[in-house]
């Protein structure tokens, strides 16, 4: 029989370390602040587009990576923010509109659908949120894009 004592708990290797607890604390705070994550997604996407535009520029202070490489890093960051936003159910129309905007932006970025499945995950989440909020989303054709958007 195992007894829960302070000594037993401190020797338990499965328990989270202080740095892991701090990470979980940050993750929890971020996951409950949709309105703070969306502008971070917007900024990362804007940075990705700007860095891609100047793709041959070398950034010596950042590992001598070029603009295209840093652009892909910004896209990866934006995808992480998009997944955080998609993961939590939308509590209102504004949060749902953010998911729709993310989907629309990512859907039209050249090569994004081949790079990652994030766009599809956001699309699925926004449809379920629409159902939960009593809002029907539908695809409508747009002349400039490969697919319709909501």
Image (cartoon, grey):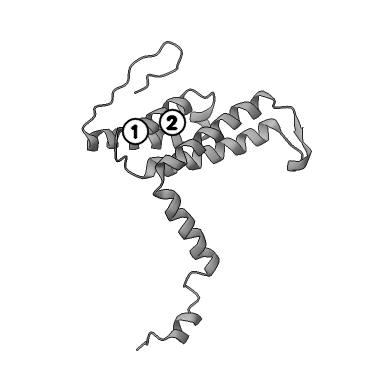
Location of residue 121 by image quarter:
top left
Badge 1 marks a residue whose secondary structure is helix
Q: Nearer the viewer, residue 145 or 19?
A: 19
The correct choice, above or below, for 23 with respect to 118 in the image is: below
Residue 102 is situated, as x and y percent measured from the top left of the image, at 43, 31
Front one among 28 and 82: 28
- Mark 2 and mark 1 lie on one chain; the one further toward the N terminus is 1
Residue 89 spot, x, y in % from top left:
32, 43
Inter-mark Cα distance, 2 to 1 = 12 Å
Q: Badge 1, how many Cα within 10 Å: few under 14, some, many 20+?
A: few
In the displayed structure, 95 sits above or below 139; it is below
| Residue farthest right in this picture | 60
The quadrant the C terminus occupies is top left
The image position of residue 16, as x and y in percent, is: 48, 69
Residue at horizontal 39 percent and vertical 35 percent from the top: 122
The answer to whether the residue labelled 2 contacts the one labelled 1, judged by CB atoms less than 8 Å apart, is no
Say which element carries label 2: helix
Q: Residue at x 44, y 53 (%)?
A: 29
Closer to us: 85 or 148: 85
Q: Quadrant of residue 70?
A: top right
Q: Which residue is mark 2?
A: 102
Question: Which residue in the rendered view is the most extreme toward the top?
Answer: 143
Q: Residue at x 63, y 33 (%)?
A: 71
Pointer 1 residue: 94
């Amino acid at each position: 029989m195992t007894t829960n004592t302070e000594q037993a708990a401190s020797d338990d290797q499965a328990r989270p370390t202080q740095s892991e607890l701090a990470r979980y604390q940050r993750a929890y705070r971020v996951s409950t602040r949709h309105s703070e994550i969306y502008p971070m997604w917007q900024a990362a996407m804007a940075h990705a587009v700007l860095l891609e535009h100047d793709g041959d520029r070398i950034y010596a202070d950042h590992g001598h990576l070029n603009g295209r490489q840093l652009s892909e890093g910004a896209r990866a960051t934006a995808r992480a923010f998009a997944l955080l936003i998609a993961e939590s159910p939308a509590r209102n129309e504004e949060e749902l509109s953010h998911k729709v905007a993310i989907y629309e932006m990512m859907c039209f970025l050249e090569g994004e659908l081949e790079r990652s499945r994030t766009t599809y995950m956001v699309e699925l989440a926004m449809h379920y949120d629409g159902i939960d909020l009593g809002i029907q989303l539908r695809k409508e054709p747009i002349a400039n894009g490969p697919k319709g958007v909501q």
